[in-house]
Image (cartoon, rainbow, N blue to C red):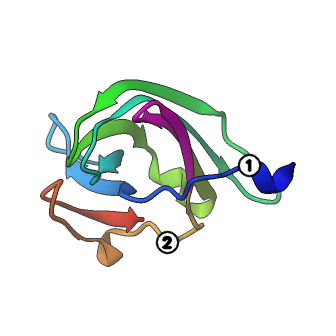
Amino acid sequence: MKKDIVIPEVTGIEMAIVFEQNENNEKDWHVYLINRKEVAIEMVMVVSQGFSETKTTTVFRKKIEKIPTHSFAKIELIHSDVFVLDNRFQVSFFEENKIMEKTFTFKANTIKEETSKMIELLNKKGILIK
């Protein structure tokens, strides 16, 4: 029975944490979901949580109706205090009427302005996971 279950590999979806200026000219970190696929993804659900062996943050959920091909969506503001934790983002979506899922984990202490790189599609510097 298990051999009959096909779990498709998810490609073309990326997660970025970007350091950017807000409307008050202060710098904040924001999470983006990037769709580099040749098709739009729909009914996107992102569930995020920070965790370590001793601490856990509240679970955050965000629904996005559609992310067009070669596009992105801003998911959430993320406070730098949680960068000492592992930060997991579980992403579920429909692609051509098939449900897909991918998990991204930013390891503790890896999100730093000095290690950020230019992310072309966003035209901003950040930390990217494929």
The extreme bottom residue here reads 115
Q: Which residue is painted at 64% across and 33% down in the image?
A: 59
Q: Nearer the viewer, residue 76 or 90?
A: 90
Going by the numbered disc 2, the residue's amino acid type is: Thr
Q: Which residues are magenta?
A: 91-103
User: Residue 109 at x, y = what percent?
Assistant: 54, 70
User: Residue 91 at x, y = what percent?
Assistant: 52, 42
Q: Which residue is painted at 36% across and 65% down in the image?
A: 128
Q: Nearer the viewer, residue 46 or 17?
A: 46
Give the alpha-carbon distance from disc 1 to disc 2, as whole Å: 35 Å
Dividing the picture into quadrants, the one containing residue 11 is bottom left
Which dot marks residue 75?
none
Going by the numbered disc 1, the residue's amino acid type is: Ile
The extreme right residue here reads 1
Label count reads 2
Position above or below: 84 against 62: below
Q: Is residue 92 visible?
A: yes
Earlier residue among tags 1 and 2: 1
Instruction: Nearest to the eye among marks 1 and 2: give it.
Output: 1
Task: Please give the residue where the numbered disc 2 appears in the rendered image.
Answer: 110
Q: Which residue is painted at 45% across and 24% down in the image?
A: 63
Residue 92 is inside the magenta segment: yes
Residue 70 is inside the magenta segment: no
Q: Is residue 43 left or right of residue 72?
A: right
Task: Please give the residue where the numbered disc 1 appears in the rendered image.
Answer: 5
User: Residue 107 at x, y = what percent?
Assistant: 58, 67
Q: Is residue 34 left or right of residue 71?
A: right
User: Residue 69 at x, y = what percent?
Assistant: 22, 43
Q: Is residue 29 visible?
A: no
